Amino acid sequence: MAQTIAAIEAGGTKFVLALADETGRILVRTRIATTTPEETGAAMRAFFRTEAGRHGTIAGFGIGSFGPVVVNPAEPDYGTVTTTPKPGWSGFRYQDALAEFAVPMLVETDVNAAALGEWRAGAGRSCRTLAYTTVGTGIGTGVLQGGQPLSGMSHFEAGHVPVPHDRALDPFDGSCPYHGGCLEGLASGPAIRARWGRSLDHLGAEEAERIAGYLGDFAAMLVLMHMPERLIFGGGVMKAPGLIERLRRRTETRLAGYVDHARLTPGLADYIVGPELGDEAGITGAVELGMRAAHIRSG
């Protein structure tokens, strides 16, 4: 029987599950609600058990997960969700939930998985260094180098970096329970609603300019710290009309001509882009992780 690749995009409200062939082509997929670890784990196992019986033995799992999650394979608690605010999920470990399949797995953050998806088949193709930022319920960034997600003692928490905050212009304290006015506390979807009572696509140019200011300051930091060949900005907030154009202008202003490179064409339209894969980026990246996990076994 043919071998298959199992992929999971694990989010706070839903899990996307897919089975792909050895080339990465998705054969079947489903969505299940993120409820309790017990219920969600049982639904995952049932799906993969059934579909593997139809399509072929699973050779590896790839998982892009909400977090915080341990992503260093050398750590004894690799694959464990840690201090998440999602009730009941702290301490959940993917290797335990999927132990019956007894195959290698690779676990990454959801944003790193999305970055991998865009690197493999979207706007990040051919980029040696790529930064993917999602701006939605939270803000996170995955940075890839040579197709490998970068991390340190843990995965990056870029959404919680401090950004310049002019309180005379914007007296909002920020919505982050840890840092108040960090990037996520000022520019995420919940922060926008807490400040103005509506989502950004229902607000005006002044509000969009303010959010673009915070995101543009952050984008300039990404350029200066990582020098990526492309910045991808996705997520629900980025769907607001005109936001990405404002983000480009702010980033270009902040860089002030200091970085002289052919990639940074005037206006940055080819440099700061939206995701080509849209909502498919995460599961595509999870398939890539699963293919790498299967290679670990075969190698």
Image (cartoon, rainbow, N blue to C red):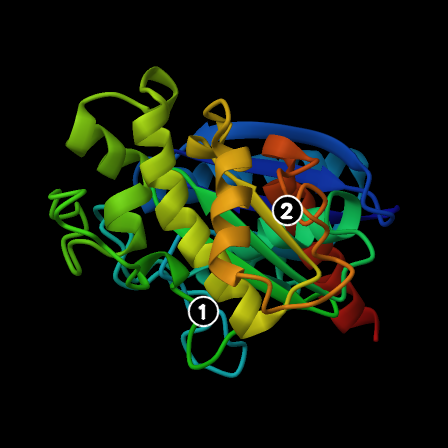
Asked whether, in this view, residue 224 is left or right of residue 1, the answer is: left
Rendered position, 46 above or below 85: above
Residue reaching furthest top? Answer: 202
Q: Which of marks 2 and 1 is nearer the N terminus?
A: 2
Rendered position, 194 above or below 268: above
The amino acid type found where label 2 is placed reads Ala
Would you name the residue on which mark 1 appears? 155
Residue lying at 22% horizontally and 29% vertically, measured from the top left: 193
Q: Is residue 98 visible?
A: no
The amino acid type found where label 1 is placed reads His
- Of labels 2 and 1, the one closer to you: 1
Would you name the residue on which mark 2 appears? 7
Give the percent coordinates (x, y) of residue 246.
49, 37
Callout 1 secondary element? loop
Residue reaching furthest front? Answer: 257
Rendered position, 15 above or below 257: above
Residue lying at 42% horizontally and 57% vertically, measured from the top left: 218
Classify residue 42 by image quadrant: top left
Give the percent coordinates (x, y) of residue 293.
70, 64
**Quarter occupied by the C terminus:** bottom right
Q: Can residue 223 be seen in this view?
A: yes
Label 2 Cα neighbours within 10 Å, binned few <14 / some 14-19 / many ≥20: many
User: In 3D space, how far apart are the residues under numbered discs 2 and 1 (Cα atoms)?
Assistant: 20 Å
Label number found at residue 26: none
Asked whether, in this view, residue 176 is left or right of residue 265, the answer is: left
Give the percent coordinates (x, y) of residue 271.
68, 49
Residue lying at 32% horizontally and 34% vertically, measured from the top left: 189
Callout 2 secondary element? strand
* 249 or 220: nearer the viewer: 249
